[in-house]
Amino acid sequence: MTLQQRTFVWIGVIVFFIAGLVLLRGILLPFVVGMGVAYLLDPLCDWLEDHKFSRTWATLIIILVFFILIVLAFALLIPLLINQVTEFAEKVPGYIGVLEAKATPLVMALLSHIDNGGANGFKDIVGPYVGDAAKVAVKFFLNLLSGVEAAFNVISILAVTPVVAFYLLRDWDQIIKCIDRYLPISHRETIREQVFLVDQTLSGFVRGQFLVCLLLGIYYATGLSVIGLDFGLIVGLGTGLISFVPYFGMLAGVVVGLGLAIVQFDAYGPILAVAAVFAVGQVVEGNFITPKLVGERVGLHAVWIVFALMAGGALFGFLGVLLAVPVAAVIGVMVRFALQRYMCSALYLTGQKDRRDGIDGGSTS
């Protein structure tokens, strides 16, 4: 098979894969989640196998424990979260009014030093939009609530996930061996090396980031609730949950948390305490948790992760978000491999070779 034929074959495989995602995205969610669960739990299953458990029993134990913990978490937290989201949506107009009452004098005092008519102008400009802002905020949180309700509908679909995860996890090693057997013999070692790099990247990011988000969610929810911040549980868990998006998760949590603190508290102490919770969490996460659990070099730049998540969500919705990081890891490894090959090729080395030939020719003359 010529190089051109191989290129067409790989292009056909990629096109077939994308077409399958587009056509079957309505039913792929439980299978993708099940595959992610199997990949996430495979090291635990291997560990139990090393301790004299059969693969089937190790898989059964791990799957049961994992999904029992998930069900307990949903049963305990979801009703509380729904109540907090509903109450939050109802209180948003009042929060906006309080925030306006606290912020307007400060802004007017600032503008008075710049222009005597600035305060009145500011009030005339901002005032008519306050009511509209409240309506938009209420509508946003009602949409958020409807999204949460839609998530419950998805739970019925996820009944398939435990079955998929069990069989994939039980047969994981056999599946890998089967795929390995069908690799082209002449390129088998190269493909194995690149797949190993992809697995290294994913295991460093996905498994590590899962633990980072879990620990941050527990820390923020506990810290904000102890301070007495309204809706501290949902703000803390939400901040931890979206911390897998670099910088955005922490920034969103700080903005929402401090905004609620400014509205709720009149004293500076609790507001500073909320800021301290986020500051300590960011310092600990950046200097200890993430380097320990994720690693400092997973091969995925923060900007690339954000782009992949946004692109995946725009193209395939929640399914695209789930597939974004694995696809980004594969593309990253392939690009680095292609660049390595390019820098070893005649296309890259031609100019250097011509310069050397010119130097050698000049010295001999």
Image (cartoon, helix red, strand yellow):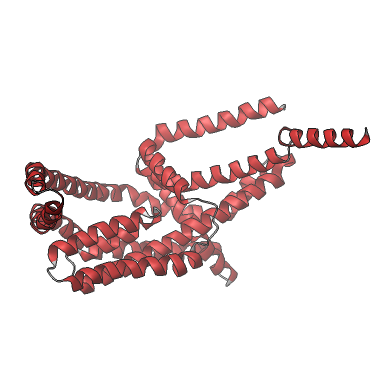
Location of residue 107 (image quadrant): bottom left
- Near-viewer residue (39 or 130): 130
| 289 lies above or below 16 | below
Q: Is residue 29 above or below residue 283?
A: above
Residue 256 appears left or right of 340:
left
Q: Position of residue 88 (x, y in %)?
A: 14, 56
**Residue at the spot 29% in from the left edge and 47% down from the top edge:** 154
Quarter of the rendering containing residue 358: top right
Quarter of the figure that contains the N terminus: top right
Residue 129 visible somewhere in the drawing: yes
Going by the image, does 326 lie left or right of 93?
right
Q: Position of residue 138 (x, y in %)?
A: 13, 47
Give the residue at x 19% y 73%: 269
Q: Quadrant of residue 95?
A: bottom left
Residue 281, relative to residue 184: is it above or below? below
The residue lying at 61 percent from left, 52 percent from top is 197
* Quadrant position of the C terminus in the picture: top right
Taking 304 as reference, is 358 above or below it?
A: above
* Relative depth, front residue between 283 and 1: 283
Is residue 164 at least partly visible in the picture? no
